[in-house]
Amino acid sequence: MSPITAQLILKPKREKSVLNRHPWLFSGAIGRVDGEPQPGDLVQVLASNGRFLATGYFNPHSQIRVRLLSWDVDEQIDEDFWHGRLQQANRHRQRLKLEPATTAYRLVNAEADGLPGLIVDKYDDFLVIQSLTAGVEAHKEIILAALNEIWQPKGIMERSDADVRAKEGLPKISRVASGESPPETLVIQENGIQFGVNLLHGHKSGFYLDQRENRTAVTHPHHVANKTMLNVFAYTGGFGLYAIANGAAQVTHVDSSYDALVLAEQNVGRNGWKRPQDEYLAGDAFDILRHYRDTDQTFDMIVLDPPKFAHSQRDIERACRGYKDLNWLALRLLPPGGLLATFSCSGLISTELFQKVLFGAAVDARRQVQVIQTLTQGPDHPVLLTFPESAYLKGFLCRVW
């Protein structure tokens, strides 16, 4: 059992977020610290009158000073705690009945599963973990042992290489944490479509698992059959492969990474499709879209799935300009009746703000735009009501005229 090393006493009238069970406690709410906790140590959070509020893990290097784990004074944060939370997440995923058609999905979604800073993804017989906080780092060996006991994978990869670790005072790590190393290209299935993924060097944990339901919705046959698609920020094929499976006449994949596009083309062949008509363009998405605008190129459907544009509050204005320019360019390339599927994975950009940005792009492009479906992350990426920040992925499927 990990001992409680300190007590954090809040300033007067600063306990509301803790009482509302938001799992983050910022440094500005803390009045004093009784004890000398180290990064990752367990601490108790007390109201200004000394009343117990919650237990969490501490990090003096982060503005999020405590990540809260439990609001029960009697709950011990020990091996049984970690094992129980992981088992609960496992039960929730089993109820989704994703397999056998889908063999890659999220098992643990950090705060939304009551485990702040821990992400676990399943890729066939392998697991990929991301340790994003000092608290998870301090308990990582316990967590790895529980993962092996519950899921019995062939191997566990650690992809703790996200930029957010720097804010926690942690180095980036990418390694085989347990068991076998996966093949350089591991083949997974998503809704029966085969994708090759690189678990040690691919984006995120290897694949964009959160877009699974959106790939299905956007590429329904009545949207894509016998149509042309421009798949921007295509990575290893994603939306484009779903469109091919549903009868798209031609798909153009655009990404900044040549290696990702090579894997995308291999994924097309891996599914038995011969597609000489498709294109794979490596380059800057904005430049390519401008070229299409200047040459009067059009597409029946465009998918925009860019990386995160806003990493902090100071990035929001610049990010909104980027999203607006991107969507403005795309709207210029669609004929009347064309479809635009546009996304933001920036947690700091709300759905309402993203819709306002899209509205601005539509006005400037002088196009009428109908939202025909609002899109979000899949059910294996749940949203915790007390932690609205867990609703990070938002998108709109739009008809343009």
Image: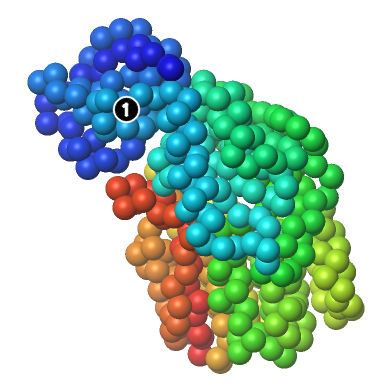
| Residue to which mark 1 is pinned | 75
Q: Is residue 148 left or right of residue 310?
A: right
- Residue 102 position (above or below residue 68): below
State left or right for residue 389 relative to residue 332.
left
Asked which quadrant contains residue 222, the reply is bottom right
At a point 22% along the width and 42% down the height, the residue shown is 20
Q: In which quarter of the image is the N terminus?
A: top left
Is residue 288 in sight in this rendering?
A: no
Q: Where is residue 232 shown, x and y percent of the image? A: 66, 67
Asked if residue 353 is positioned above or below residue 40 in the image, the reply reads below
Q: In this view, does 131 lie to the left or right of 346?
A: right
Q: In which quarter of the image is residue 292?
A: bottom right
In this view, the residue in front, 160 or 346, is: 160
Residue at image x 25%, y 26%?
Answer: 73
Which colour scheme appears in the figure?
Answer: rainbow
> Is 1 placed left or right of 198 in the picture?
left
Front residue of 369/148: it is 148
Mark 1 burial class by Cα count in 10 Å: few <14, some 14-19, many 20+:
few
Q: Going 45% across and 20% down the picture, which residue do you hit?
A: 40
Type of the residue with mark 1:
Glu
Residue 31 place in picture, x, y as percent: 20, 19
Is residue 386 visible in the rendered image? The answer is: yes
Q: Position of residue 366 (x, y in %)?
A: 47, 83
Q: Is mark 1 on a helix, strand or loop?
A: loop
Image coordinates of residue 281 in percent, x first then y, are 79, 65
Residue 326 appears in which quarter of the rendering? bottom right
Residue pictured at 64% horizontal, 62% vertical: 99
